[in-house]
Amino acid sequence: MQVDRNIFLHSISVGILLILCISINVFMYNKLKNQNEKSQLLLLELYAQEIEKVVLNDFLKIFQHNYTTNDLLIIKNFNHEIGNQNITTLSHVVYVSSNTLCIKTSNQYLILDLLNIKRILDTISENLYLYSFGINNQQILTNTLVNLTDNRLLSTPINKDLLLTVSLKHRQDSRFIVLSDKILKTNILAVIYFSIAAFFTGIFIVFQFLNKGKKLKAEIDHKNSILLFIDKDKEFIAQCYEYSKKSKSIVQEEEEGYNNDYFPLSVFCNVENNKEVEICVDKITLAIKEYFCCYKKYHQLDNIELDIIHDNLNKMILPFGYEGFYQIMISIIYNLMNLNKKGLNKKGLNKRRIVVVLKQNKICIISDGLKLNREYAIKASATIFHDTANPYLMNFGQMFVLFNRHNITFDVSHENTNGTNITIFLPTKEKAQNTNFKVVKLNQYKRKKSHE
């Protein structure tokens, strides 16, 4: 679940950065394109203003009767009549025939040669743009067959009857357009390269931030798991201690010369008057799972699995107490976990599994990876108290002593398996009645036996 969440956060971060970079690219592309179009339009407007200055001034001077022949710049060969009785038109007329422009108004008549005007306009354009020059929507001069009506830039009145129009369009092969498109492409590529660099830089920064957050969360979780495991361990110790105070059969009698071997302590004992104890399997299973869930988080052992199977067994009838049974189960699994942990750290194996099967008359514990017999189990678990400092965690040697003293049959083997099988046959009520259940210090018991 945690892995899925991390993948989700990284995917969301990459998606947001990708959308952001694409949005910036689209924005910058449109901005650069608009700037390019504006610069092209601005240049056309400057061209149109030049044409207006050159052409319009001459027409204004002619129709306003304010000129001499030397005042006109481009109109040279023309005939201008005012108030001629032959001019009978009631409206203005503009037409072109054989490079000759004819303009008739209500009281004026103008005919002029267009060749000089065309020569000057072609010189001004210098193959940079296409132009169309007209009067009253009548095309007078042009250097293209393309209709430039939609490219009209200027509409300036000559008088109340005549309107001068200028339409321009850049040539696609002109030097300005080629250079302008080249600059546009260069700028777009620069934006793309910058956005790609920014994208990967952003990914690096975001991933670093997420990884730091992940590490910080892992550290906090680990600290919390330490506190949680300490609480669970205290709960286990307190439970064993409180039970040891209540049970007369667990009283530890100090004997001279053995004070240094006081720990670990066992609360495994019989029930008074040989009564049977009914243990709720779900309750003890939940307690064991909670304890080792905290243990795994504390030691960061996600690669060790613990399964407890009881096949619909709801209750177990035992001739000894819940606390003693709980201590034995915690001690066995703890030792196996501890040995598996050391093996994983040394060999770097991937997965290990511990399976506990609870039945009415026996307990089967299967552990992957480790191959133990009685002798090696005793030797390998001898330092459990030094590893944990928990006075109620027993090693295998101490548990085996208890099993023998209470007539509990057990077997430790690794034959025909990839790990260790521990089988404990629980005593019946009749068998428990014939057993002396007085509990002494386990280390003292072993030493007394050796002295005998």
Image: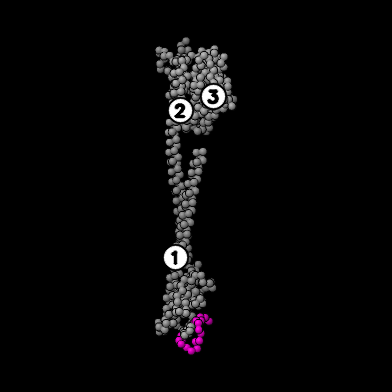
Q: Secondary structure at mark 1?
A: helix
Q: For the point 47% across and 61% down, which residue is it? A: 33
Q: For the point 48% across and 65% down, which residue is it? A: 178
Tag in front: 3 or 2 = 3
Q: CA distance from mark 3 to mark 2?
A: 20 Å
Residues at discs 3 and 2 in contact (Cβ within 8 Å):
no
Q: For the point 44% across and 65% down, which residue is it? A: 39
x then y, percent, for residue 14: 48, 47
Tag in front: 2 or 1 = 2
Residue for badge 1: 39
Which kind of residue does numbered mark 3 sit on?
Cys
Q: CA distance from mark 1 to mark 3?
A: 87 Å
User: Mark 1: few, some, or many residues within 10 Å (few <14, many ≥20)?
Assistant: few
For the residue pair 63 and 13, the one nearer the viewer reads as 63
Please give the range of residues in magenta: 80-103
Is residue 386 covered in magenta?
A: no
Residue for badge 2: 232
Q: CA distance from mark 2 to mark 1?
A: 76 Å
Is residue 88 covered in magenta?
A: yes
Which kind of residue does numbered mark 2 sit on?
Lys
Q: Is residue 156 above or below residue 348?
A: below
Q: Is residue 96 above or below residue 358?
A: below
Which kind of residue does numbered mark 1 sit on?
Ser
For the residue pair 400 and 186, the one nearer the viewer reads as 400
Residue for badge 3: 280
Lower sequence index among marks 3 and 2: 2
